[in-house]
Amino acid sequence: MRGISLFLLICLFKSFSTSAVAADLSVLFLGNSYTGQDNVPGIFQSIGSSAGVDVEVASNTPGGATLSVHFFSETSLSLINQQAWDFVVLQEQSVVPADDGLAGIHLFPHAANLNALITDRGSETALYMTWGRRDGYTATNFGVTFAFPDYESMQAVITANYTRAAKENDAVLAPVGIAWKNVRASHPAISLYDGDGSHPSVNGAYLAALTIYCALTGTPVTGSSYFPPGVTSADAAILQQAATEAVLPVSASNEWWTME
């Protein structure tokens, strides 16, 4: 991915020219409560800081916001234009990517619209793939009746639509939903969800931040010394491994890369 190679080149240049052990990284997060709850941007910043990377973050995460909301938001547009961010991370409303029709209204066109603004400013776009509801989703939302009997069926549609959006915009894809799926399968005792079965717990927010950091920098997050209060050291090691394996080509867990 372009962002990974650029980040590594910057690190290499600085290591030879200044002997610095850290490269500056600036990231803007545009999303909703899946980004804002438990402060995913702040956790992301702390992961970088613990590795000696000087990380700057900013965010706009109003509850329930779609990418279409961000495209028409003066706050989001002002933040995009504030500077040439290394990355602008886009997170769609939680159920929109689980329906092809809604994705066609919100995700695909407005990921493209925002990507045009982001790249014109000299920044790079990243998409934050989210997760399915803990127990599936059978409800009416946005005028659409969802009938997902379980988590797996919902995650499959979310994964496909985020992957398509990333490919269409030549964007970095942070496969948080894939890391989430793998942790659910291999370590079900780790609670990734808040009590509502939708939003992330502190474990889930940590997993999201780890996966995004790994995707943007191309560096493993295994062995990170930072984990937020409420996450045990044992669980942190598991989540770090899951994030790394979901992003980097080290196991079959990143089979989503080949999805059409």
Image (cartoon, rainbow, N blue to C red):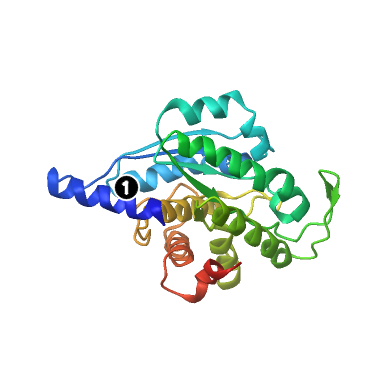
Give me the residue at 36% from left, 61% from top: 220
Disc 1 packing (10 Å; few <14; some 14–19; many ≥20): few
In the rendered view of the protein, which quadrant contains the C terminus? bottom right
- Measuring from the top left, give residue 137's x and y in whole percent: 78, 57
Residue beneath disc 1:
50
Q: Left or right of 65: which side holds 257?
A: left
The amino acid pointed to by label 1 is: Ser
- Determine whether the residue tagged by mark 1 lies in a helix, strand or loop: helix
Q: Is 138 placed left or right of 165 in the picture?
A: right
Expressed as whole percent of the image width and height from the top left, the position of residue 190 reads 57, 62
The residue nearer to you, when weighing 10 against 155, is: 10
Q: Position of residue 34 (x, y in %)?
A: 61, 45
Quadrant in which the N terminus is drawn: bottom left
Residue drawn at point x = 67 percent, y = 39 percent: 66
Residue drawn at (52%, 24%) of the image: 78
Answer above or below: position of 235 versus 141: below
Residue 65 visible, this orientation:
no
The location of residue 84, given as percent across then percent down, is 40, 33
